[in-house]
Amino acid sequence: MTLAQFWFILIAVLWTVFFVLEGFDLGVGMLHSVTGRDEAGRRAVINTIGPLWDGNEVWLVVAGAAIFAAFPGWYATWFSALYLALVLLLAALMARGTSFEFRGKRDSARWRRLWDALLSGGSLLVPLLTGIALGDLLTGLPIDKSQNYTGSFWDLFQPYGVYTGITLVAICILHGATFLTLKTTGEVADRAARIGARSGPAVALIVIGWAVWTHIVAGKGFWPNPVEIGIVLAVIAAAWLAADRHHGWAFTCTTLTIALAMLTLFTDLYPNVMISSTNAAYNLTIANTASPSYTLKLMSIVAIVFLPVVLAYTAWNYYVFRKRISSSDFAAPRLPGTQPPVHAQPEPDAASEPPSVPEKT
Amino acid sequence: MTTVDLARFQFAWTSVNHFFFVPVTIGLAFLTALLQTWWYRNQNPQLLRLTRFFGTLLLISVAVGVVTGLVQEFEFGMNWGAYSRLVGNVFGPPLAMEGLAAFFLESTFLGLWVFGWDKLSRRVHLACIWLVAAGSMLSAAFILAANSWMQHPVGYKMVGGKPQLDNIVAVFTNPVFLWGYGKVVLASVTTGTLVMLAVSAWQLRKGKDPEIFGHSLRLSLIVLVPAITLTLFVGDMLGVVEGTYQPMKIAASEAQWTTCQPCSFSLFQIGGGNNDHTPVQIIQVPHLLSLLATNTWNGKVVGMTPLQNQYAAKYGPGDYVPNVFIQYWGMRVMAYLGGLVWVFSLWGVWLLRRKKLATSRLFLFAATWAVITPFLMNTAGWFLTESGRQPWIVQGLMLTKNGISPSSSFTYLVISVVSFIALYVCLAALFLVFMLRYSRREPEPDPSVGKAGEPDTRVPSMLY
């Protein structure tokens, strides 16, 4: 295996970890208004990912930066091709990222509704747009022989790319719903479980459709390969287990589905990194976009030193916040400095909440 | 207006805005860590209240700083595709290292700090805020290493007309990087202290909690004095280093068209700019430019006209003079305000020694308004260093106009520039409104009071 191939695999791994981790918090973002019917429930839902989402998002940054360092040609062509889509993606990430901090900063129902909408909308757009971006790699974009994108914004909406985006949105919903059943209690957990059970079959159908389409786009003969069969089995199992309320196993299966989907996408892409729909001879490949060996060696050392450390403290972070969160923790009015009550209280709805000094977030 | 102009405007707009929030984050993370350490050592509940009060301001700045940082990373590929393709093997690694070594550290431990008050032991919780502070300073190191390579490329060899990284140690020991990084960290700490000083001064003027904000007023002043003093010193050294590698930048910052030795420094000028080579220079301080640019009394500064001829002979015909107006005034805004803040900090020290710091109405009034200066200085400084590099995107290797993505379209750039203006205006408004609102609140009462019945009285976490 060459260093460039190693980096291709590593980048596939970075994308996989990104979708596995950020996948559930995107799902939680999309579903937070539906699973938390009142303010206390919504806050409980948002706080399940409170300490986690920012670290999860760094995987996207690192995946992007790794492509920049290891495959500058791929980075240059892909990011400049995606131009307006990336502007939109950045807007979505901004809306989402700031909503966590600012949503609770004013005690007004209208203000919170605004941020709820931004959180849900942003969380929906992120997997949709990154899905389109990844799907387009495989299905091909107009690229000329000097590796430059020659299409327009609308050329990005290749049917397969768009469908990949929809598939990612769907799997994030199921992934997020099962995550919430594991991290909350009471009514919120019940509602998340219902969403998981109801959306399961639809998500399974969408993902199976994607596996078939991917098989066709990649043009790898009639018989499906074991990984594609794995995706189909994993997503069916996830839907089944979610309906059967085996939430831990359901979450394992959604994780597996995401990982196998990324595995399929990147193995089908190999040894190319971006297909040119203009001419197969213009395809961007591992070989014709990779950095020279000094850079790849350097980056390999950096990755081997830092990734285990990052994984270790990320795991510790998840361990520290392993406890389930209950909406009753948020039922009390936001008085400064008061400990959330231990016992459940009747949940006042947002409108009847007494005006109070907003709590520090 | 060409596509390149728009792309440059977009980068300037997004990075200048980003750098409103970054120094506040770096500075306040460090100061919050100091406050919490102070509390950890003497258990004074007032210090805990202060830690949480300024921690809240830190979080507002982080929220806006993080999302604007994402844009920077994407823009290199979006607008500067040809640049990314050519130098990605040198410029990409520091960015990837930044993500791996700094962003994960900062974001993960910030989460642990915010939500972990009641879950972690005090010692571990304190370590978390220090790791956040370290992460924020570390991320500045990597991006500055990348930026310094654009100012003064080192550690590479040319293979087939393309630069290839062959010595990463050289990239991280680049003198432009070492001094530039020192400058950025010190300027950020200065910014943070001026924010804390302003908030404390405002609270004291309004007579709120005089005792508690007296602590933060003293702490911020004690950190400000060395920070601004060192900023001025390091800034001077950076000027000398840049004068060596980017003589055009330094000549332009004095509007010096002809070579001089020794060189004087003009306090103001009337006229000037790229087409006016003989502006009216007012109050010339003899030898000062020689000192600033070379650290010697009689140092020589080569003028822009000979440099232009030299570059044209070396790199082919073209205009190698940056925007002189920006250089001249960028330099002066930064230096004059820096000097002013230094004098202001000495005034504070004098009051502190006479035990009048927290009661001098005039000082508290000045301290409240002094918060504007670091933002002006930081912005002027970036204009000076980035505009001064023009017309190069990488000094001597690639012209800015050649770095643009070939697929860039004028229409798409207009759409993206307008979008980013709208988005950043919203973000800046959010930042300002909530910074002001939360700076003016009373700090929460001691959160551990009233729970004496519990065996382990831990502080509640700062939930969303």
Image (cartoon, grey):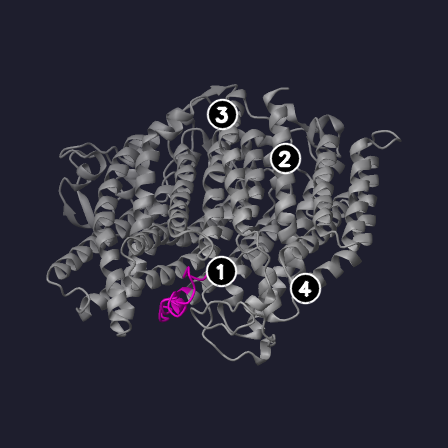
Up/down of A72 relative to A175, above or below: above
User: Label 3 belongs to which residue?
Assistant: A298
Tag 4 near tag 1, CB within 8 Å? no
User: Label 4 belongs to which residue?
Assistant: A35
Mark in the foreground, 4 or 1? 4
Residue A3's spot in the image, x, y percent?
A: 59, 22
Q: Are marks 1 and 2 on the same chain?
A: no
User: Label 2 belongs to which residue?
Assistant: A13
Taking depth in this image into account, of B146 and A81 the one nearest to the observer is B146
Q: Is residue B450 magenta?
A: yes
Mark in the foreground, 2 or 3? 2
Q: Amino acid at mark 1?
A: Leu
Q: Are marks 2 and 4 on the same chain?
A: yes
Q: Amino acid at mark 2?
A: Val
Residue B333's spot in the image, x, y percent?
A: 28, 52
- Find the distance from the CA under tag 1 to the CA under tag 3: 37 Å
Mark in the foreground, 1 or 2? 2
Tag 1 near tag 2, CB within 8 Å? no
Tag 2 near tag 3, CB within 8 Å? no
Residue A51's spot in the image, x, y percent?
A: 52, 53
Q: Is A67 situated left or right of B15 in this image?
A: right
Q: Are marks 2 and 3 on the same chain?
A: yes
Which residues, given as a range, are shown in magenta? Answer: B435-464
Q: Is B109 situated left or right of A109 in this image?
A: left
User: Label 1 belongs to which residue?
Assistant: B427
Q: Quadrant of the N terminus of chain A?
A: top right
**Chain containing the residue with disc 3:** A
